[in-house]
Image: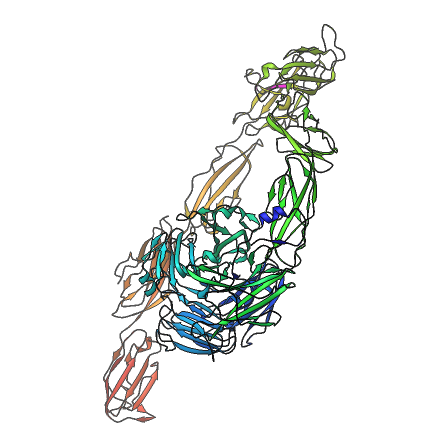
Amino acid sequence: MTLIYKNTIKAVTVALLLFVAHTGFGQSSQGKEFWTTYMTHIESPLPSQMVLYITGDVDTKGVVEIANSSFEPIPFTVKAKKVTIVAVPHKAMLTNQGRVPKGIHITAEKKIAVYAHIYAQNVSGATLLLPTNVLGQDYISINYSQASNADKDHPAYSIFCVIATEDNTTIEITPSQALKSGQRANVPYLIQMSKGDVYQAMSLGDLSRSKIRSISTNGGECKKIAVFSGASKIGIGCTAGNFSSDNLFQQVYPKIAWGKNFVTVPLQDRHFDIYRIYSSEPNTHVTIDGVPQNPAYLESDNLQIVATKPVVIRSDKPIQVAQYSPTQGRIDIDICEEDLSDLGDPEMIYLNPLEQSIDHVTLYSSSFFAIKKNFINVVIKTDQIPGFRIDKLKYTNFKRVPYDTTFSYAQIPVNYGTHYLSANEGFNAVAYGFGDHESYGYSAGTSVKNLNQYIVFNDLQKDTTRLNGCAGIEYKLKLALPFEASNIKWTLADGTVFTDAHPVLISQGTNNGKPIYFYEYYKKVSFSPGDYSITATVPNPEVNVCGPTIDIDFDFNITPYPVASGEAEVACVGAPTVFHDTSDPKGALLTKWLWDFGDGQTSFDQNPVHTYTTAGDYEARLSIANDNDCGAVSAVIKVHVRPAIQVSFTSDAPICEQQGVTFHSTSSVPEGHLVQWIWDYGDGKKDTLATDVAVHSYDHPGIYNVKHTVFTDAGCNDSTTVTGLQVNPIPVVDFSLPAICTADNAAFTDKSTISDNSEAGFTYLWNFGDANATAANPNTSSQKDPHHRYTQPGTYTATLTITTASGCSVTKTHEFFVSGSNPKAKFAVENAENLCSANAVTIKDESTVDPGTITKIKIWYDFAAHPEVFEVFEGADLHADKKYVHVYDLATDARQYTIHMEAYSGVTCFEIHDEVITVKGNPVVSLPALGPFCTNDDPVQIVPDNHGFAMQSSYFSGTGVTSGGVFSPAVVGRGDYEIIYHFVAQNGCETADTMYIRVNDVAVVHLAESVTSLEGESTRLTAEAIGIGMTYKWTPEIAINNSTLLSPVVSPVDDITYTLTVTNGYGCEVKASVFVDVLKKIGVVNTFTPNGDGINDTWVIKNIETYPGNTVDIYNRQGEKVYSSVGYAIPWDGRYKGTLLPTGTYYYIINPKNGRKVISGSVTIIK
């Protein structure tokens, strides 16, 4: 098919050679109307979500509705090549088998592509939706072997759904497995459906190869239906033990859209893929990488293969191939060993045959649910790789298909979101993604073709066929049929009906060995822009379920011609020139561009970049075409390519670090003038200047590459780079200053260095700054370490300039003072009358010189005894506060010392000063070693030893001690404590001694104050002690089983107090006592005589009064209670209700409580 150009510009020749489209007879997966369903699946604790990803080549709007109006219509808008996401309300979900009016209907004003995605936590399935106009009447369900980790009480099912797109639709279903609703396997049954009805079939078995077809009603045409297959939850691969499952959801392709040639591509980062091959006719012969497969096996079952690399599948009859992603962690189909690093879960994707390819698509890579990695698999002819683009960028990282290298494939990692794929010719693509036990996958798009019967436009001018057309062009309608037609009824887009009673066969051909017959409408047709449908109705040569006639529909689009125009940015020879497409597409989608740059070079990019190699004037042209192959050529685009710039520059020499170097641009341009100069100095710094001179300072020495770029007034630029620019190091100049007086000869010492250690190449120039210099005592010198005599005191500035062997010079100046030659030495001793040997002696320097400063002092602190020991302070070592400190050896007696000082104003100019001081003797005291103590110890008096020194005063300090030296362990508690004893002797000299006392914790003991014990029985004394290394001792050691246990057992016969002594690991003791109250045995007599004689008149119970809360109950022979008391304070006198009971035997129950058992027996009243 060749493009047609409405313009008559002579330059169309190149465009005609470029834009050659492929003849095809199909519709793409874009359309204006779609049907889908919210297929049932097992939800997680949270409800699932269904979303629609809607995109298109042009801006449009539409609406999403449901057949039963259970939710309000949802309007949407779509921007060209962007994705709009529409959430479908949860109430649209199917919940069981049967027919319900829940078909989801998507319509748009202009063509769109739609993808449906159902997901929840740990379940996800997605599919490409087919527009209504490409749906068929005959389908085979494609599922997978049904196994799931679903709860047995809520089993998972293999599923297919059928949607009626028109009223009065009759569906014949032949399930391959028995259905949940009772229909038997391989037994057909009929379903009557209205537009928007959805019939969902469910089975515990694999519903693959179930047959679903629309049949004629009352002899009418078979209606188009949409079919979806999947599973509510399924595991794929080894399903023994623990395994994860996912839902499957795919729209089934009608059998007329099946193909014969497939290239499979593995899903990225999975261990293996499973493929199933389905045939539509008997005796289908399939090869896999050239190896023939058994046709009988293909017909009897699904032909299944496992692959880890691309596979080429070919057939002599139409087939469908489905690709399956396994359960997460599975490393092979029959191996249950788990790879814990694997990501993904079951997914089913229907693959497109090579015959059903597309040349562009906008798709959406989803992040739902918890998807971590997204990919797009692409299959394309190898020679078409240069024209493939993703998101408008060229992508060439393809690999050859091993068995057929004329095809290549790519597994492209992408971020989630919208992606636009395009190519000059057709390709197939699959979008998919994986997460932790999550997956989704779907075909990116398809071109649905029936190669045996179709209608196309016949372009009479070019003798080509086309599926869509251009406004105002006359075409002949060409009809292809797999049989000869006895008559043809043509129904045109405007309603015109023409019946050709004797159609003329214009040509005959074959397709895959089958004859094809071609007919034409009797006259030419042309259209204005818009969408149209034409139908050719012919007698059905076979008697079948779809009636006596067959309708061949032709849905097509007519677009206006675009207006081509373009422009070029400033063109400079040798530099990229950007060209911009400014064409008017007239409401259609531009898909092809051809730029002729006028120098023999071309480009297919929309906005290309081209480099002219020769200056001059060129005539460029842009040829364009829209998606209907309606093309146009622009007028001449004049391009003036400006000549090259001569770029050069010079620089100062030598170049020294940290010193400015001047760069001079010597660049020139034959046309225009220079307006901008850019310098890249090679050290990370750049300048953009409006003049041709630049000054730059390098921070460090080294070799640098300097790049210089200039711009002209037209925007052209060029650059040059000078490599190996040497930046030399500079010296670090320094010298020592003389500290001199006028009597000295000043010595200057050079201390300069350089980073490359080339000090031997230095040259020196000194200037001493002496206005009184003479020829014999010059003011300058070229020596390294010169001398100079200053004859007058005052301030001078000395200057040293060093020049390196490479010519880099640096100057350093120092200001200093030349002092007078008569210094005055003097110092004062601070607190001279109260010096103690334990304290430091401080002297303050009071030396002077006029004019000038003291430059050095020497101090002897014991000049008479040790003239060889002194300290020197010079220059920066001189103390700013002029105070100098010395500590003499500690002595207990008074001693005298001579302090001697020399004060210098230069090297040879100095004066001395001496003073004799008396240092008092220091007392000595000491403290005894005490402790360790326990926290319950009594206070202790600390007694110091003053060693016979007369005391003026003393005191103690520290935690827990009084000023008088009493230390209280109980007050301070556990810890280590510093105690200081301060002592002032009679001569006023002070001293101190420090001691450290440790206080340890005692054990913490918990013991009851009292317990009760029964005479004749044992009682445990329960104690609790907290501490370390504890030992125990109970006293007295009477009636005790073990006196060294923490909780011993005692059995005293009388009341007693026990004391527990606990000693911890520190040796600290603590005591606690417990009183044991011994309850004596109860003595019961069995008779008493209440006769009033004062002897035994009451029933006395010995010791019962010691049992608090006791109870006594007495009964007669008839079981009647005649006495009861709580506490037996008043003994029973034999009376009941005030009347003395008769002689006889009575029965008692005594409950002493307090641990003593109940006592029962009889007592006799005797009178």
Residue 64 appears in which quarter of the rendering?
Answer: bottom right
Report how many numbered discs are placed on residues in the image: 0
Q: Report if residue 862 lies within the magenta region.
A: yes
Q: Left or right: where does residue 687 sit relative to residue 40?
A: right
Residue 998 appears in which quarter of the rendering?
Answer: top left
Q: Report if residue 591 lies within the magenta region.
A: no
Which quadrant does the C terminus fall into?
bottom left
Looking at the image, residue 738 lies above or below residue 975: above
Q: Position of residue 294 (x, y in %)?
A: 31, 59
Identify which residue, 820 or 1156, lies in the foreground: 820
Region rendered in magenta: 857-863
The type of colouring in the image is: rainbow
Q: Position of residue 136 (x, y in %)?
A: 48, 68
Specify whether residue 960 is in view: no
Looking at the image, residue 642 lies above or below residue 1152: above
Looking at the image, residue 225 lies above or below residue 468: below
Q: Position of residue 551 (x, y in %)?
A: 51, 71
Residue occupying the far right of the picture: 771
Identify which residue, 51 or 546, lies in the foreground: 546
Identify which residue, 124 or 261, lies in the foreground: 261
Q: Position of residue 696 (x, y in %)?
A: 68, 29
Q: Left or right: where does residue 607 sit relative to residue 1088?
A: right
Specify whether residue 234 is in view: yes
Looking at the image, residue 1139 lies above or below residue 450: below
Identify which residue, 662 or 922, lies in the foreground: 662
Which quadrant does the N terminus fall into?
bottom right
